[in-house]
Structure formats: structure tokens, C-alpha cells
Image (cartoon, grey):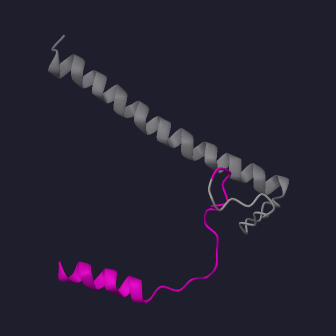
Amino acid sequence: MAIWLLAIYTMKNNFEDDNRVIVDMNVEGMSWYNPNKTSDLGINSNLSKYDFFKLMLSSLKAALTIAAIFSIALIIFVIFCLKVWFKV
């Protein structure tokens, strides 16, 4: 418990603001909304076609890997149900 409190105390006292915007809170409907304010999140979206293709390919590989893991888990569960649990 003491280590946990020490970690929180250290995090609060060693905080340094680097002025990066993670999420723009200038949202329509909020009391502080300013329609004239420009949103600059510091994101560099000037990707070449090759970089964009590699990004999409990597995203597709990650999604298919996760889908394959869930599919294999579902197949194993169904086999378990049929052979062990229900004893068909």
C-alpha cells in the first residue's frame, strides 16, 4: 500500500506538461466551444502512397490475426462441447 501511495505521489510531483494536445475538447455543444478555433493536433498525415499501403497492410494483418485467434478458440470450444460436455 505504501509503495502504491509513493508511486502516486511521485507521479503528481514529477509531472511535466509538454503542451501536446491528445484530444481536442473544442466540441460543439460545450459551453467553451469556439467555432473560429482551428484544430491542430500535431498529426503528420502527409504519408506517401507506399507508407499508406504498408500501414493498411499492417492493420489488415493485425485484424486477421485477432480474427484467426478468436475463430480457433470458438472451434476448440465447439469441439469441447460436442466431445466432452455433451458427449455426442
Q: Position of residue 51 (x, y in %)?
A: 77, 57
Range of magenta residues = 1-29
Q: Position of residue 37 (x, y in %)?
A: 78, 64
Q: Position of residue 6 (x, y in %)?
A: 27, 85
Q: Is residue 14 magenta?
A: yes
Q: In terms of image quadrants, where is residue 13?
A: bottom left
- Left or right, 5 with respect to 47, comes to left
Q: Is residue 71 magenta?
A: no
Q: In terms of image quadrants, where is residue 10?
A: bottom left
Task: Please identify the residue farthest to the top as the structure is shown.
Answer: 88
Residue 47 vertical position relative to residue 57 in the rendered view, above or below: below
- Residue pictured at 69% horizontal, 59% vertical: 33
Compare residues 68 and 18 and report the one nearer the observer: 18
Residue 83 vertical position relative to residue 59 in the rendered view, above or below: above
- Residue pictured at 75% horizontal, 66% vertical: 40
- Residue pictured at 66% horizontal, 54% vertical: 27
* The N terminus, quarter of image: bottom left
- Left or right, 5 with respect to 53, comes to left
Q: In terms of image quadrants, where is residue 72?
A: top left
Q: Position of residue 46 (x, y in %)?
A: 83, 61
Question: What is the number of callouts on the image?
Answer: 0
- Left or right, 15 with respect to 29, comes to left
Compare residues 83 and 44 and report the one nearer the observer: 44
- Residue pictured at 23% horizontal, 25% vertical: 80
Residue 72 vertical position relative to residue 35 in the rendered view, above or below: above
* The C terminus, quarter of image: top left
Residue 16 vertical position relative to residue 42 in the rendered view, above or below: below
